Image (tube, helix red, strand yellow):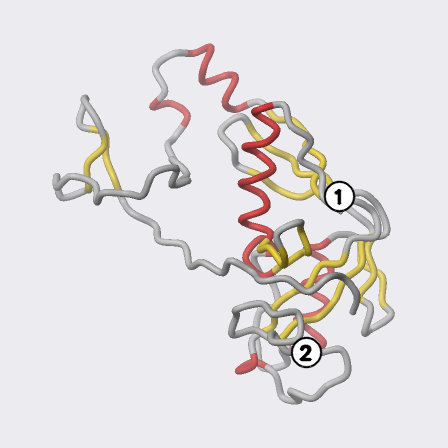
Amino acid sequence: MSGQVGKERFQKRLRIGVRFDGVGFVLLDGQPLPKLEKNSVAELVVVPESIEDASIRARLTGQKSIPFLKEGALVLFGVSPTMIDNKHAAGLVKPEHPRILSEYLFVEVKLDADLWLQVRGDQEAGLSRCLCTITALSRPAESLNHAFTLISEAYETKRRSHSGNVFERGYVMSKSGWQNLDELRLDAIARSQSGADCSNS
């Protein structure tokens, strides 16, 4: 594994159910939202039909491509120790080695092409297909989603299903250290909206 060692800002995500009362958002039971820190980032999930302005609704449901990761970037995918038979299998990286605050062990994937983020206007995002290589297995994959499935099949032998959220399971080296792909996704969307270069190496 290569790349500068950094510190990951590992954060769990909390989903809070809210409703719009005609004036503002409140909790589902009518209580006010908890006070949040300044510049807190969140996502608002609504059905498109709830947006009254048709032009805004059309803009938010459109799609664009944003540069996400460059060819050669290394992605570490987390695998659950409780799902692994052999925790000393070749290719497993302990979290203290890359200094990622996580309960996972990691497996490295190298991008063989540039990776793009496909973003709808409402910020719902997915990853483009991107050829990559699972380093420890010397095995190619057609996308990061495909790579994670192959990794899970090879290492998480106790799992019945080998699908997973690559944004939550993946980490990549950024300027601030190892960063979760979900956090990187939000950063890329925000930077694209401001007109800044959002690609990472």
Image spot of residue 58 (x, y percent): 50, 16
Dividing the picture into quadrants, the one containing residue 127 is top right
Give the residue drawn at x 67%, y 56%.
172
**Left or right: where does residue 172 sit relative to residue 122?**
right
Q: Secondary structure at mark 1?
A: strand
Relative to the observer, which residue lies in front, 74 or 134? 74
Numbered label attached to residue 178: none
Query: What's the residue at 66%, 38% (across, down)?
Result: 117
Mark 2: amino acid: Tyr
Amino acid marked by disc 1: Leu
Which mark is on residue 115?
A: 1
Residues at marks 1 and 2, CA–CA distance in whole angstroms: 25 Å
Residue sitting at x 57%, y 25%: 193
Q: Residues within 10 Å of mark 1 (few under 14, many from 20)?
A: many
Q: Which residue is mark 2?
A: 155
Residue 131 placement, left or right of 192: right
Q: Nearer the viewer, residue 62 or 37?
A: 37
Residue 17 percent across, percent down from the top left = 27, 44
Compared to residue 185, the image places residue 165 above or below, namely: below
Give residue 9's position: percent from left, percent from top.
Answer: 51, 58
| Mark nearer the N terminus (1 vs 2) | 1
